[in-house]
Structure formats: C-alpha cells, structure tokens
Amino acid sequence: MFDLTAIDGMFRKLLDGAIDPKPLLPLGFLLRAHSAYLASVGAVMAGQLHELQPLLRAGLEQAGYGHFIGNDQARWERWMDRHDTPDTMKAVRREFTHRAVADGLIAADAKLGGIYTQLYDQTIDYGGHPNERGASMNSDIVDLPDGGKQMLAIYLHSDPLMLDFSMKMTAQVGLCVLRIAKVIYPTRVQAVGIAYQLDDMCKRY
C-alpha cells in the first residue's frame, strides 16, 4: 500500500503546477493516465480485481498515446479529427494501433517498450478483454452437500495471493507510466526531484 501511495506522490510532483511544458500535447494524456492509476488503486484496494484490469490498460494506453503523439501537431490534429468522416476514422485506426504505439516506445527505450508491451498483454489476459484467465481468476466452483456444484462469480477478492499479485501489477503499471513520462519530460522529472525515487522503486518491481 505504501508504494501505491508513493507512486501517486510522484505523479503529483510531476504533473501539479506544470507551466508551459514542452512538448505540451502529451501532458493531457499523462493527466488521464494518473486519473486511471487512482481508479486502479481504488479497485485493487476494494478487491475488484477483474474490474482493475481495464483501468490498468487505460492508464498504459493514455501514456503510450502521449508518447506516440509527442510534439507532432499534425498527428494530434488527425487524432482529434478522427470522427469527422468514416475515412478519417479508418485512417486514425490504422495509424494508432497498439503495435505502432509500442514500437514508438521501443524505438525510444527498448527495455521500457518491452515492459509496456508485457504489462499491456497482461492486462488483456487477466480481464482487459473477456477471456479465460480473467474469468478463471474471478470465479470459483463450490461443492454442495447434496453433491451438486455452485458456480460463483467473485466480485470482491479476499485471497491474499491474488491481492498481492494485483497490487504489484498496479504498482508496475504506475511505474511504467512514470517512466514513459520521464522519456517525454526528462528535464521536468529531474527538476521536481523524482528521478532517483523512480529508478530506485523500479529496481524492486
């Protein structure tokens, strides 16, 4: 729990009071990534582990899109205009693929891009999309006294192993987003004094 709070603290130091950041465009995506992180912390602390995964995925995607757009005003305008016509919608869908976003990160920092891809795939596996692992982790079959079986959908987890795994994953996603922010805003990360804390915490995750 302490690490989740510390990660939130790093987000706040990075984002609060930022004046005329350069590049400007990614900041909005990082604000939404921070918001998704806070929602993720709420879900994991409540034991809502299935509902957690789409929130973690959203945080990763917000940060990934922020990096992918960067200071590219034309790309930003294409993304903003995606709903103008069916053709612009198709063009943006072709441009803003998960692979393209991940490849952009890999080109900037191969290790970080690999972590982003691994965490993204993990969120999909455990509930970001409906699938077997997400369903299995959040359901149970109970043997009844009469020999029958009862299928349970687990809404609120209390299993310490599951909770520990999910809290660790939440921290990993938060740290990944902050590392993407460091790629985008290296000077800001140094200036607000979170570079050492971020690097030190990443070593533990």
Image (cartoon, helix red, strand yellow):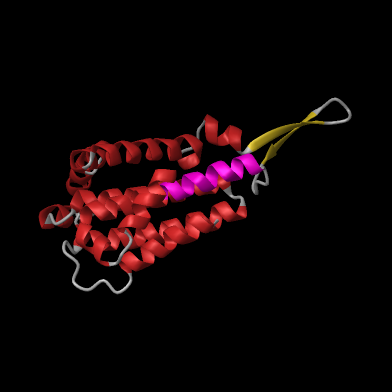
> Is residue 203 in view?
yes
Nearer-the-camera pick, 41 or 2: 2
Q: Where is residue 19 in the image (x, y as percent from the top left)?
A: 22, 73
Describe residue 52's horizontal placement relative to residue 201 as left or right: right
Describe residue 68's horizontal placement relative to residue 42 as left or right: left
Describe residue 143's horizontal placement relative to residue 119 as left or right: right
> Is residue 85 in view?
no
Nearer-the-camera pick, 48 or 173: 173
Give the magenta-colored segment's residue range. 160-173
Considering every residue shown, the one lying at the far right of the view is: 146
Q: Where is residue 190 in the image (x, y as percent from the top left)?
A: 25, 61
Q: Is the magenta stretch mostly helix, strand or loop?
A: helix
Locate the C terminus by quadrant.
top left
As for residue 62 lying within the magenta part, the answer is no
Describe residue 61's horizontal placement relative to residue 8 as left or right: left
Nearer-the-camera pick, 40 or 85: 40
Nearer-the-camera pick, 193 or 173: 193
Q: Position of residue 54 (x, y in %)?
A: 45, 47
Residue positioned 14% across, 52% down in the render: 75
